[in-house]
Structure formats: structure tokens, C-alpha cells
Image: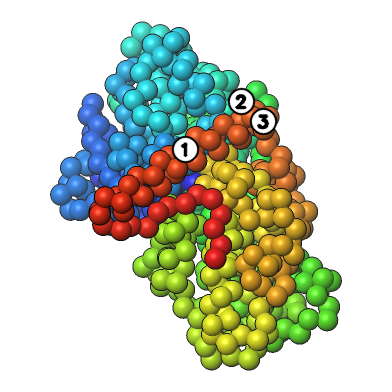
Amino acid sequence: MCGIVGVVSQSPVNQLIYDSLLLLQHRGQDAAGIATANGSNFHMHKANGMVRDVFRTRNMRSLPGTTGIGQVRYPTAGSASSEEEAQPFYVNAPFGIILAHNGNLTNWQQLKDEMFRVDRRHINTNSDTEVMLNVLAHELQLSSSGLQLDPAALFKAVSGVHRRVRGSYAIVSLIVGYGLLAFRDPFGIRPLCLGKQETPEGIEWILASESVAIEGIGFEFVRDIEPGEAVFIDLEGNFHAQQCATAPSLNPCIFELVYLARPDSVLDGVPVYNVRLRMGDYLAEKIRRELPDVAIDVVMPIPDSSRPAAMQVAKKLGVEYREGFFKNRYVGRTFIMPGQAVRKKSVRQKLNAMGIEFKGKNVLIVDDSIVRGTTSHEIVQMARDAGANKVIFASAAPPVKFPNVYGIDMPTRGELVAHGRTDEEVARMIGADHLVYQDVDALKQAVRDINPALKTFEASCFDGNYITGDVTTEYLDRIERARLAPSAQSDRDAASEAIDGGAARSQLHLQLSVE
């Protein structure tokens, strides 16, 4: 999960991109980057950190031009700490291309090998974004004749990308001297939205991961980019679009609606807030069926993404809705913390339970999802410490039982508390008196209730169906080994430091660890 934006403006674009990235900050907190085009030159600044920390006045001044792209990074491939793998990425031939990516390529390692052996291109990092950039560059070289590019050649190149690349991807890229090229994978897994603004000087265009980044800076939301579609906006603001995939189908990531996207966004015709309300309706029905004799005094959300579902649960059950957990907004989202030790510590820093709302009550806590179980365990314990009589825990999402390989950081089965366990076993592990999960079919129906045109979804973490068709058990085993190996080395290094008298530090464990 990352956030991307691309803008073709009639005035300096750096501030527009910066403001859009602030609105997409929830999609990535590891790194941020902006690149602009000014005549025949690219200008770029990127670094690890939040948007406000990465860009200072001097950095903004070094980003002239009326066309640009930006990204906030949440790493799913490559190194989480390497500034070299912050985006955008640049390649100088052909033409000069700079690119940012949201998603995860499932065949990036194979493509990296092909780049070296067949295409004679060197990939310098372990980032799948650099692989995508070089695949696009190679296809552009094949599709263009002479020194000129036209929309037909660009769209032919994107068709070549679709034939070679597997996985999820939403792309924004700049081609020096030509304009902005953006496209979406043929399955429409990761979102990409289009907006525009009329000015006296002409039309300005924006593409972004969520509609909130478009409307939040004063642009008008136009539509979603279709699966497999590519759009090209030249430097004069002329807009071109073409379907570049042979058999596109819309399968949006349902976890975007559960957790990742902001509630004030609209993705693929679905207002996120409305879906979360509807999820609460279905969850309330299941709670009533499964716990008919359990007394519930209050319903409480875990702020912020579970609040709409919790409000509907309380309304449907006829139970009082209360805010018992208060959030420190200066701590990052615990779901994207780098390791278990850091994640567990951050929960207490992020949330505080107010005793007056818990003391002597049977509390129903509603969260958006349960992934590793560590956060849920800490929350249940906080409720008990605050004086709760009983703690009933409800997840607005179904059990996360399978790895996600399309851009969400839950790739190993051993990390998933619901993998291979019953609901009763998970309840005991997180310390709850009762646990209720949303049903998979109910979650999908909640989305269809809002937009009946949506028939299928990317919901692999819930149902185990990997829609790209290339994810096998062997593939999952391979990525798990690759992910766990650095963790084991990190643990050995930490132990060595302690033995040698070095400063003590927390070790980051990827395996599930619930105390």
C-alpha cells in the first residue's frame, strides 16, 4: 500500500503535489518523494520519513516545473529502511522516464532476471518499482520509432507491460518533453482516480490513489481509471485514454474499503464511509445470531477506521454507543509498524482507555480487522485494566487467514492469528470473552449494496483466491523464507550486541508473539 499522485498544471506544481501527498499520508509513512519536469530536466527530492519531515522550503524551491509526480511509501518489497528505494525512480533511456508505483509485482524477481539476461538492463535495488520502470522503458523503446513519441506508441508500450507484468499496480510516470503517463493493472486491484480543474490558462489534470487527494486540493473528481486503461496527458493539457489490456476485469482490493482508504474517499464508485456503515449492519446481525444471550452494555470503536461500523452495530443492537478509547494522533498506524516489538509498544502510546466508560460494564469493542492479533490483545487488556466486566470483541472484517501478495504487508502465514485457528482459539489468544468475525460473503455484499455493478473483488487475505492466477503454495513459501531470513539475522545481530556489552535494543520479531 502506497499513495501516488501525478499532476499536469498551468502553474508550478510542487505545492499541489505536496498538498496531495499530505492527504495520502495514511497510505504510507516510511518515505516520501516528489519529482517535477521543467523543460528537458527532471528535479527530484525523496527521503525516508513523513511528508512534512521530508520536504523543507529549500527542497520545494528545488522542484520547479508544471508537471510532476509524488509518492508516499509503505514498503512491501525491498528494504524498508533504504532511502535508495524511496520513490520515484528514474531511468535516462529512452527519452528519460521517472515513475512511482502503488502495488506489488508478483513476478518481479523473474522480470529482474529477464532485464539482465534479455533486455540488457541493470536493476540496482530490490524494489519492484525499479523493475516496473525498466519494463516500461524497454517497451517504450520497442514501440517508438525514431525520436518521437505519440499516444499510440505510449499505449502500445503499456500493452506490452500488461503482457509481461503480474500482480497489482497503479502507475504514474513522467516522460521528459512529453507529459504524464498513468495506468492501472488489468484486474483493477489498486485504485487510481482522475480529476481536473478549469483555469483561465487551461485545464489542469490530476491522478491520485484516492479521490480525497483530488477534491482536497480543490480539483473536481472525474472518474476512476479503468482496469488495464492507460491515460496520457501532454504538456499542453491534452488528454488521451485507451484500454491497453486484452481481457480487463474489475476486482478492487476489498481491504482498501475495510481499512486502508480514508472514509471520505470514493473508490470505484463506492463511498468508503457508506460501505463501513453497511459492514456494521451485517456485523450486528451476526452478533445477534451468535450471542443472543450475552448482555452488552456499550459498544465502543477502536478509532478511527472502525467508527462507522461500530455506530451501526450499536444502532442495530439498540445498545449505547460510547467512545472509550482515545487516540494519540502523533503515533503512526500500528498496522504498518516494522515489527512486533515496536507494534506492541506503540499500541499503548497510541490508545488510552478512559476508565469511567469501562468500569463494571460488558463492553463490545469493534475493530476494523484482526491481522496479527497483537494489537487486539493489547486493546482487550487495556479494557480489562480500565475495569471492564466482560470484553466482547467484534471484527468488521472476516478472519485474515491467507497472505496478501498484492501490496499489503501481511505476507507470512505464521503472522496471521486466524491462520489455522478457530474463532474460539483466537478469542483465547487475544483474551476476549467472546469473538465475532464478519462473514466473507457479508463483507462482499456490503460493497455490492452500495455499488451493485461490482461483482468480484480481490479478497485473497480472506478467501484465499488469488485472482492473478500465478500465486502458488510454492510462491508463498518462497516469499515467506525471503521475509523471515533477514529477521532471523536481525535477531542474531541483536543478541551479539547484548553479549558484547552494546546498548540493549528491542528485537523485531515477525512471528506472532502474544503475551
Image marks 3 and 1: residues in contact by CB distance under 8 Å: no
Which residue is at 75% across, 54% downward?
A: 440
Residue pictured at 54% horizontal, 26% vertical: 107
Q: Is residue 234 visible?
A: no
Mark linked to residue 382: none
How far apart marks 3 and 1 lie (CA) works out to 20 Å
Tell me how far mark 3 sits from mark 2, CA to CA: 23 Å
Location of mark 2 (residue): 245
- Tell me the element at label 3: loop
In the picture, the disc for residue 485 is 1
Front residue of this view, candidates 34 and 2 = 2
Question: What residue is at 68 percent from the left and 67 percent from the top?
Answer: 428
Q: Residues within 10 Å of mark 2 (few under 14, many from 20)?
A: many
- Give the side of residue 397 with respect to residue 217, left or right: right
Residue drawn at point x = 18 percent, y = 53 percent: 57
Q: Percent from the top left, x then y, of residue 271?
A: 61, 58
Q: Callout 3: 10 Å neighbours few (<14), some, many (20+)? A: few
The amino acid at mark 3 is Thr
